[in-house]
Amino acid sequence: MRTPEEYFEGTMDMTEPRKTVMLAHKYFQMENVNTGRAVDLGAGTGRDTLFLLRSGWKVCALDEKQQSIDIILDRVEPEHKAGLEVQVTNFSNMTLPKEVDLINASFSLPFCKPEHFEHCWKTIVQSLAIGGRFCGHFFGEHDEWASDPELTIHSLEGIKDLFKPQFKIEYLQIEQGLIPNFDGQMKQWHIYHVVAKKQT
Ligand SMILES: C[S@@+](CC[C@H](N)C(=O)[O-])C[C@H]1O[C@@H](n2cnc3c(N)ncnc32)[C@H](O)[C@@H]1O
């Protein structure tokens, strides 16, 4: 597995947002909601944060690494600076604002240690407003990294249970196979891509 520093180096210029965050934004637009308050958990080098800011959202970008936040502060356009807040925090002890409209966690929650995942997920659910959305990714049991005890891995049933009963899953794609990593190295992935709406 690459280090976070290698990930930052390799993705520093990437601008294409993840499909899940674009979908969540589109689902809001279909309800005539064009913007709101978002949190980007494990924001990395900011591809999703920048997309949301450019789309008019106010964004809190959170990451445990100061380097991630420094890169995002460097990348954000002057006209979007006012819409950006940042937090250097670990998922294990984060607190989030209330009544958030969108929580995005692209390829980040699997890196939350299993013993901290329950707190992390509870914090996410409590932070979201009713009608708000979660979008992001989880790793499944057939992922090459699934045996790493530091990672949180989910079964399909586990994913469905996470979102029960408060959410409606609007999009769930399971991607499995040998697919290049950010650096072009092939890796066996097992990914759940999710968008879900908080109903109650
Ligand atoms: C694979 S990167 C994904 C970055 C970005 N969301 C993207 O899609 O490109 C995972 C990110 O989560 C952050 N991260 C990992 N574990 C974390 C934790 N326990 N608390 C907060 N951030 C964490 C890492 O520093 C890194 O920026």
Image (cartoon, rainbow, N blue to C red):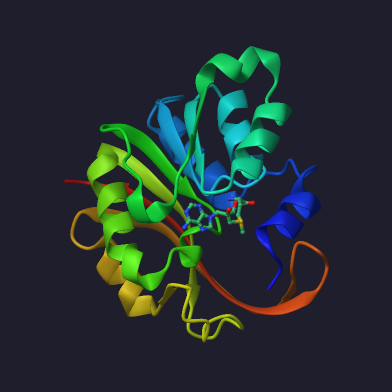
Residue nearer the viewer, 186 or 148: 148
Residue at 81% across, 73% down: 185
Q: Quadrant of ligand 1?
A: bottom right
- Relative height, residue 142 to residue 18 (above, below): below
The quarter of the picture where residue 128 lies is top left
Residue 40: image location, x then y, percent: 49, 41
- 183 relative position to 79: left or right: right
- Relative height, residue 157 to residue 63 (above, below): below
Residue 186: image location, x then y, percent: 78, 77
Residue nearer the viewer, 109 or 67: 67
- 159 relative position to 130: left or right: right
Residue at 65% across, 13% down: 79
- 91 relative position to 86: left or right: left
- Relative height, residue 123 to residue 97 (above, below): below
- Relative height, residue 117 to residue 127 (above, below): below
Q: Quadrant of the N terminus?
A: bottom right
- 58 relative position to 70: left or right: left
Residue 189: image location, x then y, percent: 62, 77
Q: Residue furthest right?
A: 184
